[in-house]
Amino acid sequence: MAVQHARLQAWVDDTVALCTPARVHWCDGSEAEYRQLCDLLVSQGTFQAVPARPGSFVCRTHPSDVARIEDRTFICTTDPDDAGPTNRWADPVAMKATLRQRFAGAMAGRTLYVVPFCMGPIGSPLARLGVEITDSPYVAVSMRIMTRMGAAALAALGSDGTFVPCLHSVGAPLGPGRPDVPWPCATELSDKFIVHFPEDPSIWSYGSGYGGNALLGKKCFALRIASHLARDEGWMAEHMLILALTPPAGAASRSTTRYFAAAFPSACGKTNLAMLRPTLPGWTVRCIGDDIAWMRQGADGALHAINPEAGFFGVAPGTSEESNPNAMATIRRNTIFTNVATTPDGDVWWEGMTADPPAQLTDWQGRDWKPGAGRPAAHPNARFTAPLDQCPVIDPRFADPAGVPISAIVFGGRRPRTIPLVNEARSWAHGIFLGATAGSETTAATIGTAGVLRRDPFAMLPFCGYHMGDYFAHWLEMGRRLGAQAPRIFFVNWFRKDASGAYLWPGFGENIRVLKWMCDRLDGRDVAEDTAVGHLPRPGSIDTSGLDIDPAVMAELCAVDAEGWLREITLIAESFSALEPRVPKSLRSLLSELKHSFGVGSQRREAAP
Ligand code: OXD
Ligand code: MN
């Protein structure tokens, strides 16, 4: 490919000199190139074809390289306060010196791939360009699925276009006595670095080949770097799905499609909600994105969203014909499966895909596996990588360069207690309070203990590229700009449990009932009660027709649990203290009001309803 862009060529030349690869390959993004790279990965033992799914491959990683590594993820700003207490900060000059040492000779014996990519539809005013240099063909093929990658992105760069340089190496150079392995990576945690320089902006990632650590368009660019750019430029880069919701034809005052954006922490069901198959007749949900939304005020004054990605990198375990039939249809072909189990008849399997596991499997580490083995067959963070346009319910506007206008923003988390099934914020500021105080039990999407409650404001804890207190202020500022056109804000919790640990709410396709209640609110129907914590559903206002659920359970799901809120208030206050002095005053006032409603800090200890 002829490269017209002198700065890009100079960066590639400098990187070649530093990393000393054996070859350089500029990716054109063609189908032929994709096939060649997949063939190469098969010949290297990294990929194995999945005969049951045309054009699909399975890949097993090194056991040290199975998830995002938050402990080795850094934000390098001149002033540590700009990164804030929720990020790992490192000095940019010292970190670059460390990284230059790591990258020196890091690609010896390997091919250096230059991967131009566009986040968002090419030509969209909301889109941004990047170039990833990587020594991993797995990354190159995954980037072709996850982004608009290759010649078109390079052409969009022209001779002087702005791009975010993203440098990646698996950190396992080849040389005498160092034969290649199917999944090369740095095997010690301390040898892995996922580093962001928002002031450049640039990204350097070393030592991991996995997902969000290595496909640098996703978490590194589209969230951490983009959130920083968005703050400076007056837009929003969010960890959100985007869906289109259409009520039954002819329903009074509700015939139009509305677009919702929803933020949930990693592995809390964003993909399931984004392509939900409604159980209520006549309702339709279509998918625009399942992980990231970039949003900007349009000329019409409304908040418009695009999905900057072109594919799904979804969590496989738990995905089934029951939980997400549309995802199952999406991954019937042209899909890369990572760390799943394989069946003797040439298919893939993971926990939750079928009620009973097959009698014999090869597990994610390539070992024989039988039911009762005492360990999962698929890694809990096993993933599928598949093109967005293979989703049977992809929305026709998924690549609309102008984005889609957002009517409602939904936050959520995995909370076994206290947090109601659905709650509507009283105002934009109250919605920001709900987002800022979101918490969730941790999942396998990151290395660390799963099932521990942690505050995850806006589901952005691992992804906000600057000080979280400033991020809250940016949301408040966006509300001021949007004025009356600001979307309404809701908070949902599908994960309430009873004393025996069973889920109270059926979830999945039944979540349409909650989306319907939100539409009722948007349509101005009188279906909510104003309580100390927000607008909760009036008894009977959530449509449970055809659902076998005890009204007492519905009441519990929509009640204010005073004891639980007292505990919650203490935790919220602690999380705000950690961000001081940058918590906006209006959020502090909302916390005081909440305390006051529950009698905290006053003589009276009875709780308000
Ligand atoms: C993801 C994550 O992979 O949030 O989307 O971890
Ligand atoms: Mn995510």
Image (cartoon, rainbow, N blue to C red):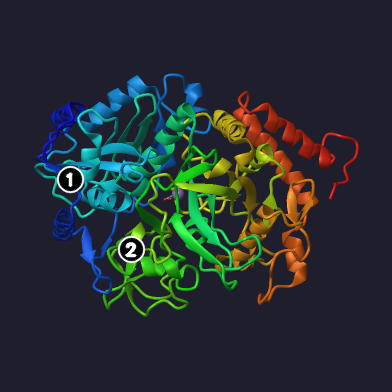
Measured from the top left, where is residue 130 in percent x and y?
Answer: 29, 37
**Number of marks in the image?**
2
Dot 2 surroundings within 10 Å: few (below 14), some, or many (20 or more)?
A: many
Q: Residues within 10 Å of mark 1 (few under 14, many from 20)?
A: many
SS at circle 1: loop
Q: Quadrant of the N terminus?
A: top left
Secondary element at image label 2? loop
- For disc 1, the marked residue is 27
N-terminal of the pair, mark 2 or mark 1, is: 1
Residue 31: image x %, image y %? 18, 57
Q: Amino acid at mark 1?
A: Cys
Q: Which residue appears farthest toward the bottom when viewing the image?
A: 359
Q: Residue at x 60, y 71 (%)?
A: 280
- The one nearer the camera, 530 or 186, is 530
Say which residue appears at 21% left-offset and 39% top-offset.
155
- Tell me which corner region of the image, top left, top right, bottom left or bottom right, holds residue 554: bottom right
Decide which of 525, 36 is in the foreground and name it: 525
Kind of residue at badge 2:
Trp
The circle drawn on residue 364 is: 2
Q: Is residue 358 above or below residue 122?
A: below
The answer to whether the residue bearing label 2 lies less than 8 angstroms from the nearest atom of ligand 1 is no
Q: Is residue 376 visible?
A: no
* Quarter of the figure with residue 72: top left
